[in-house]
Amino acid sequence: MQENYHFYEPTQGHGLRHDPISSIVGPRVIGWIGTKSEQGVLNLAPYSFCNVFNYRPPVIAFSSVGYKDSVRNAIETGVFTWNLATRDLAERMNQTSLEQDVREFELAGLTPVESRFVNAPRVGESPASLECKVTHHFRLQDAQGQDLDTWMVLGEVVGVHVSPECIVDGIYQTALPRPILRGGGPGDYFEVSDTTLFDMRRPK
């Protein structure tokens, strides 16, 4: 049945115009990570290698290719924030992806807001933000045990900020703030919409 499938070994190249792995495992939540350095410099950057990995307590993880400011700040200070990226904020979120030494909040015209429990900035314009305390961090390895230039940071969510406009009858409405997800192409993004919603409960 799968005889005509395109097959490749990632170590040998994919043979396509663009690596499909991040498209197959996607679209992915964007971790819009806010941190503050030990010197007090604010930083904001998006990471598409991100997700929630536990319910109680909630644990968020993001991964960075390269030991970037967000990773360094989170590890050194022990805290970070996760901020929801929406369609209305997409272009400004994209501006914060610059790897140059810039002040991302100012560059993108965003408002840094103090968190309640952690010393890291939230995005004032974001309809939902999570305050996180680092629980674990490590460097990824390949199957041979060789270190990769990729770092993962996990943090327990200790505070949650949600705009009341996103809550209807006591339930957070995922599609209401129009969150965006990262596709795998060079510039592919997807917007979550109620038009693609379907209901399916776990079997009992």
Image: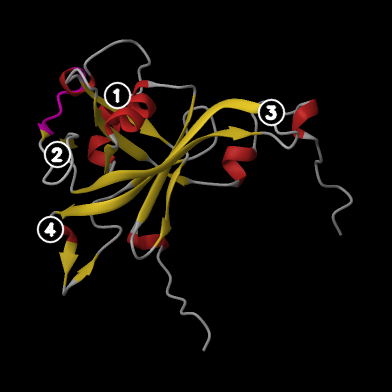
Q: Which mark is residue 165?
A: 4
- In terms of sequence position, does the residue under pointer 1 or pointer 3 come before the other? 1
Residue 79 seen: yes
Q: Is residue 108 magenta?
A: yes
Question: Does 43 sit above or below residue 61?
Answer: above
What's the CA distance linking mark 4 and mark 3?
47 Å
- In terms of sequence position, does the residue under pointer 4 or pointer 3 come before the other? 3
What's the CA distance linking mark 4 and mark 2?
13 Å
The residue singled out by tag 1 in the image is: 96
Q: Residue at x 43, y 49 (%)?
A: 51
What's the CA distance linking mark 1 and mark 2?
14 Å
Q: Amino acid at mark 3?
A: Gln
The residue singled out by tag 3 in the image is: 146
Q: Amino acid at mark 4?
A: Glu
The part of the chain drawn in magenta is: 107-112
Q: Position of residue 114 (x, y in %)?
A: 10, 37
